[in-house]
Image: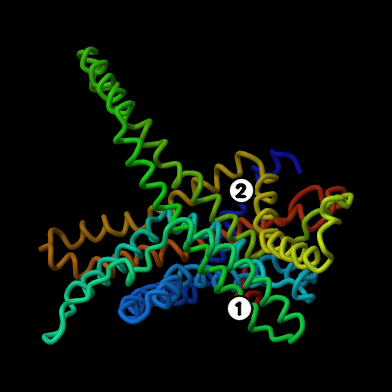
Amino acid sequence: MNDEMRVRDIPAVLVSAWRVLRVYWAPFVVIACLGLALRSGALWVAVEVSDHNAFVAQLILVLAPLGFLLAMIAMLWMTRGALPNVAELSRREARQAPTEKREMRLVDVAVSVLVPFLAVYVSYGLLKEDLYRFTNEAAYDEFNQFTLGEPPDIDFAGRLAIYDWQVVLAIVVIAWVVRYALGRIESVTRFLWLAFAGALVEVYYTSQVAQKIADFREDGIAWVQERRASRLVLDQYDQVVTSLGPLANPVDTATTWLFGLLGAVDAVVIVPLAWLTVGAVVLGHKLSAPEAPTAQPNPRWERIPAPVRRVGGGLVADVRERWSAFWNGLRMMATAGLLPMLTFCLAFLLVIRIPWLVGQLLRLVIGPLQTDTWLAISPMEKAVGLAITMVLAAALLAAAIDWLLGPKLRPTADAPQPAAPHEVSPAAGA
């Protein structure tokens, strides 16, 4: 398939997304609202539990982004039978999981979904919002609890479960071992619910890593801004702009716009690509990766005792397999072509601005409000904007992934052109 053919398919993909939305908008709205309700409920429960056990509260807190993710997965999963290429792939048998010794399922590659999703969640500012709300409410409760007979016992760090990066790294290693152990137990007991327990383990450690990366990013930006070199550069820039006279304002405006564009790279590039990766994993995880060439045995590896070698090799294969769907999704997007990917990025850029547009529309309709009144309706305003974003993103993702799967499911010689997106019907999606 050449680039010109792929570009001509873009309108058909957008039409297919509209058809998906037209058929499934009602269940999509319900699922999105349920996901947002789970997010808010998890935050409230985490605050209450943190007074008794900070670790358990952190386990509950990771369910907040999970509510958003499960809603997106449910909406994408609902469209499988309505899109031709996705339906064809869903009928195929997936390869065998190396640890569980059964057919690979979506829950087995949960980390491949979580990593790109958390990139979206962080870029939206939702992770920071969750942590701020949890920290603010838990700290308020901790500061205001007291008894008449005992002195106040205030422990912010213990209640909020604030970990150093060394602890987070240890959590990752322990999580990998626990996930591998659960897979080995499942291979013997055939108790399938252990896979979901393993998925929750991955949710916990990936959320901890995402939180720590977000903290490092903010600390790094603050550190750079506080350096003397940064201040000297800013001072020199101000002097140069001032010396330009009448051109000072246009140059400053253009420079501000350029740096603003660079700062918005998350919204322009990372978020759309991360959403496409999520869709590629959810709907295309059954695609097999190319066979890796057989490597010659390493003499140093042969010196290790056989039991240690067997367990270590199994752990490495387990971790590699759980990331395989993520790399497959990236490879799928790499073959799409530059112009189609830019078109999808632009479409997603419009979709993720929906919450801002909803806020502006409400301000236009309602008019000025007292601060207390606005604070009362602000959570509902954000929920409506996020729900609309989720619904539109799910429809667009389903159509885009169906188009990307086309060349992967048939030989190029037999089908040089991708199948046009089919008409979506309620019966097909049932």
Q: Please, is residue 317 above or below residue 274 in the view?
A: below
Element assignment for label 2 = helix
Q: Please, is residue 343 above or below residue 34 in the view?
A: above
Residue at image location 49% in from the left, 60% down from the top = 168
Q: Is residue 180 left or right of residue 383?
A: right
Q: Which residue is mark 2?
A: 10
Q: Which residue is mark 1?
A: 196
| Residue 312: percent from left, percent from top | 74, 63
Classify the position of the C terminus by image quarter.
bottom right
Q: Nearer the viewer, residue 12 or 183?
A: 183
Tags 2 and 1 touching, CB below 8 Å: no
How busy is the neighbourhood of tag 1: few (under 14 within 10 Å), some, or many (20 plus)?
some
Residue at image location 70% in from the left, 55% down from the top = 328
Q: Amino acid at mark 2?
A: Ile
How busy is the neighbourhood of tag 2: few (under 14 within 10 Å), some, or many (20 plus)?
some
Q: Amino acid at mark 1?
A: Phe
Element assignment for label 1 = helix
Q: Nearer the viewer, residue 261 or 173?
A: 173
